[in-house]
Image (tube, grey):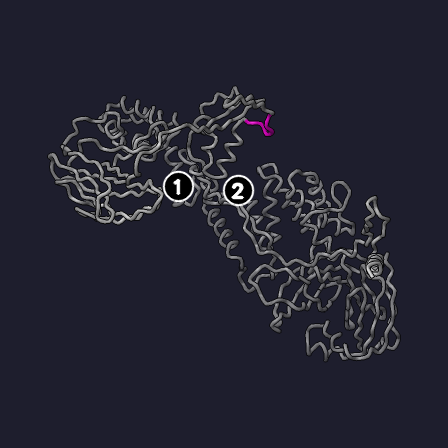
């Protein structure tokens, strides 16, 4: 029985085109797949994707408005880079600090002079000693474990209590921000705060109550209370901070009240506090603090402080009152320029002192003024550019397929809300500019093309010399498409050929698409720069459409001209019919065949179609020469029905790819043929779907439309109309998904 089953399997495999090979050295038989490639599943029509807004980014998926200096903050790594002399490879032990986000990390890796491939290193161990000898630049991270003293007794609750001045709370030491707590003295009538930190160093959860009280002689502030008990639930190894504020209305010596921490009504810990002297003036002034230097220091002391201080943590506005002196104003700005620091209040004194250089710097940072003036001002003091100020950004939209080729009503409408907003924003900006520049006209041409205003886009594009803009390649791409719109195949082909070997895939594919359409318009197979068929995602759908069987026909006089592709034989059924009656009842002409589905044809003829031709003409039987006739063709899995319509053009539909192609009788693509499409949806309603004109290849995408979702389409009714070549009405099935 097992031998019989194996024989059946082998016979089935032979039927599928699998060759049986002899057993290998282990006695295991194996098969070789010799099935024809046509058995592979063909890719069906893919509906058009939603329209996406695209923007050029310097950082991955980040709008230009969010690309601020805070994205890569100052830090020790960047400080090391600024101090590097550039004569030796740059390495920094602070590389790991530059990792606030992926953008900073990538920039840091780009700056560090580490090789892309690590050099071979020698590592030797001698007991507890390790020797590492690097073969090139490297950063080594070392972690060491050392012995420590064990804790004695039970771990207590830890409490710390400190007073601080909210206006001078922190200091910067060695690039780190640290707390600045008060000593034994405090100023009268000054807002003060107290910080209480409770820590649970144990491994069990603690439910505590913390009692806090403002010092004697103080008044509570910020909604605080004289005495307050705060319940605190501390998880293992957690810390919680409590703060309260107060002030002393008069001078004197007052006792502080230490914070008390209780559990189950028993005190388990308390803070430390000492008497506080409240005075009009501190006896020990921190002459090194910015508070003192900015207000009490001499002019030279202020400059000396600014020369060494961390200006990112320094409130420069505290010396604004000193800027009334022009000479001192210029000294301070010179120092700040050297340290790459800007402060709007200090620079604003440039207007008072009539200092053009500083005034230009000040006005260049006044974004609100630029917004109020529309983004465009050009004079000796300021030159506002909305692109540089991030008020205006060029955006692209794709894929975008319009349903209508002509304006609906008197006014042209842009149905996509984002495109409408972007187009009007550009127009408002340009309306305030004395004259549009070359880049402006190029943007205008693009947004006109988004609205299918091709003639106006051509005129806008002509205004821009290619060598006058930095985006020469984009200028060429737009020029290639506009050349096809003008039916200038040679011009479009010449532009596309220049970028056949462009190294960036998406741009090379964009120009390859132009070359493919030009080749098809000329009746040639599309090829790439190496002479092979173009293989690109943008072209795959069109290539798949060329492999699909296609079957259409037309009646020319007494002859039936069959347009076919990838079909060898068809069956022709002929029915006598009343065309006017059938068409008036239902505009879907393809349904004429459905009406005759259960009716025996008046005559049936088998027709062979030569594979080397795209058209085959046959004589209709004489009995049908003078009667209204429905001709039904079946072959290659396709069915096509047509009434007797006089016309001199051919229409080939690729249903599964949602496309049709219109050609003249001699096989040349017919451009600018008008196409109107109605759709019958799953809910039974017939709706207008789209209209437009065939392109330079004679192609028209009758299925794709950008817009709000509608019920699924079951079938399309298509009217193809040309002034010279007549009309055709036919029914097309919706693409399979």
- Whether the magenta-drawn stretch holds residue 435 is answered as no
Q: Nearer the viewer, residue 548 or 6?
A: 6
Q: Which residue is mark 1?
A: 367
Does residue 51 appear to the left or right of 201 in the view shown? right
Residue 173's image quarter? top left
Which quarter of the image is occupied by the N terminus? bottom right
Pick the front one: 573 or 618: 573
Say which residue label 2 marks: 60
Magenta range: 114-119
Q: Position of residue 192 (x, y in %)?
A: 21, 39
442 relative to 613, above or below: above
Residue in view at x 59 percent, y 67 percent: 711
Look at the picture and state if 467 lies above or below 548. above
SS label for mark 1: helix
Q: Please tell me in which quadrant of the rendered image residue 647 appears.
A: bottom right
Dominant SS type (magenta): loop
The residue depicted at 62 percent of the width and 40 percent of the height is 473
Drawn side of residue 139 relative to residue 76, left or right: right
Q: Is residue 324 visible?
A: no
């Amino acid at each position: 029985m097992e031998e019989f089953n194996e024989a059946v399997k082998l016979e089935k495999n032979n039927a599928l085109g699998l060759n049986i090979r002899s057993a290998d050295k282990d006695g295991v038989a194996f098969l070789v797949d010799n099935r024809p490639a046509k058995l592979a599943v063909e890719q069906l029509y893919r509906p058009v994707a939603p329209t996406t807004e695209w923007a050029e980014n310097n950082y991955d998926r980040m709008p230009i408005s969010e690309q601020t200096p805070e994205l890569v903050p100052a830090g020790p790594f960047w400080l090391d880079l600024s101090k590097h002399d550039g004569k030796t490879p740059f390495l920094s032990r602070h590389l790991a600090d530059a990792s606030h986000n992926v953008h900073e990390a990538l920039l840091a890796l780009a700056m560090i002079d580490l090789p892309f491939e690590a050099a071979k290193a020698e590592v030797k161990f001698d007991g507890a000693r390790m020797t590492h000898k690097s073969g090139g630049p490297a950063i080594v991270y070392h972690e060491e474990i050392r012995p420590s003293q064990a804790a004695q007794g039970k771990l207590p609750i830890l409490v710390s209590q400190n007073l601080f001045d909210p206006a001078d709370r922190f200091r910067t030491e060695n690039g780190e921000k640290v707390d600045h707590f008060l000593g034994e003295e405090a100023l009268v009538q000054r807002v003060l705060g107290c910080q209480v930190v409770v820590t649970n160093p144990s491994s069990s959860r603690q439910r505590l109550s913390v009692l806090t009280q403002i010092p004697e002689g103080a008044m509570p502030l910020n909604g605080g209370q004289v005495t307050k008990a705060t319940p605190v639930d501390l998880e293992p190894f957690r810390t919680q901070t409590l703060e309260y504020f107060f002030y002393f209305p008069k001078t004197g010596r007052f006792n502080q009240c230490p914070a008390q921490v209780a559990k189950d009504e028993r005190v388990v810990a308390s803070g430390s506090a000492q008497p506080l002297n409240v005075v009009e003036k501190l006896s020990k002034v921190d002459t090194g603090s910015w508070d003192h230097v900015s207000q009490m220091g001499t002019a030279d002391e202020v400059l000396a402080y600014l020369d060494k201080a961390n200006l990112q943590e320094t409130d420069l506005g505290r010396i604004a009152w000193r800027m009334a002196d022009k000479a001192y104003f210029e000294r301070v700005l010179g120092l700040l320029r050297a340290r790459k620091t800007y402060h709007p209040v200090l620079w604003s004194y440039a207007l008072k002192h009539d200092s053009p250089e500083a005034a230009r710097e000040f006005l260049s940072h006044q974004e609100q003024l630029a917004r109020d003036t529309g983004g465009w001002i050009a004079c000796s003091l300021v030159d506002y550019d909305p692109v540089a100020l991030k008020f205006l950004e060029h955006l692209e939209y794709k894929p975008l397929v319009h349903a209508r080729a002509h304006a609906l009503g008197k006014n042209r409408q842009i149905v996509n809300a984002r495109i409408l907003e972007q187009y009007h924003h550009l127009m408002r900006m340009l309306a305030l500019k004395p004259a549009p520049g070359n880049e402006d006209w190029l943007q205008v041409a693009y947004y006109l093309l988004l609205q299918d205003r091709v003639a106006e886009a051509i005129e806008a594009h002509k205004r821009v010399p290619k060598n006058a803009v930095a985006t020469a390649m984009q200028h060429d791409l737009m020029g290639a498409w506009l050349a096809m719109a003008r039916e200038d195949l040679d011009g479009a082909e010449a532009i596309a050929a220049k970028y056949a070997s462009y190294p960036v895939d998406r741009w090379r594919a964009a120009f390859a698409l132009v070359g493919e359409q030009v080749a098809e318009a000329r009746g040639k197979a599309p090829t790439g720069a190496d002479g092979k068929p173009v293989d690109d995602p943008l072209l795959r759908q069109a290539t798949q459409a060329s492999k699909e069987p296609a079957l259409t026909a037309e009646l020319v006089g007494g002859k039936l001209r069959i347009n076919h592709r990838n079909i060898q034989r068809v069956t022709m059924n002929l029915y006598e019919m009343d065309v006017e009656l059938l068409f008036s009842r239902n505009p879907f002409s393809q349904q004429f065949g459905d009406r005759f589905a259960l009716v025996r044809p008046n005559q049936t003829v088998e027709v062979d179609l030569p594979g080397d031709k795209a058209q085959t003409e046959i004589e209709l039987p004489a009995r049908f020469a003078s009667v209204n006739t429905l001709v039904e063709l079946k072959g290659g899995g396709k069915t096509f029905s047509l009434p007797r319509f006089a016309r001199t053009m051919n229409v080939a539909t690729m249903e599964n790819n949602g496309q049709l192609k219109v050609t003249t009788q001699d096989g040349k693509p017919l451009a600018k043929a008008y196409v109107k499409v109605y759709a019958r949806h799953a809910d039974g309603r017939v709706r207008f779907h789209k209209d437009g004109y065939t392109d330079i290849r004679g192609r028209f995408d009758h299925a794709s439309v950008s817009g709000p979702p509608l019920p699924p389409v079951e079938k399309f009714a298509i009217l193809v109309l040309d002034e010279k070549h007549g009309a055709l009405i036919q029914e097309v099935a919706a693409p399979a998904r």
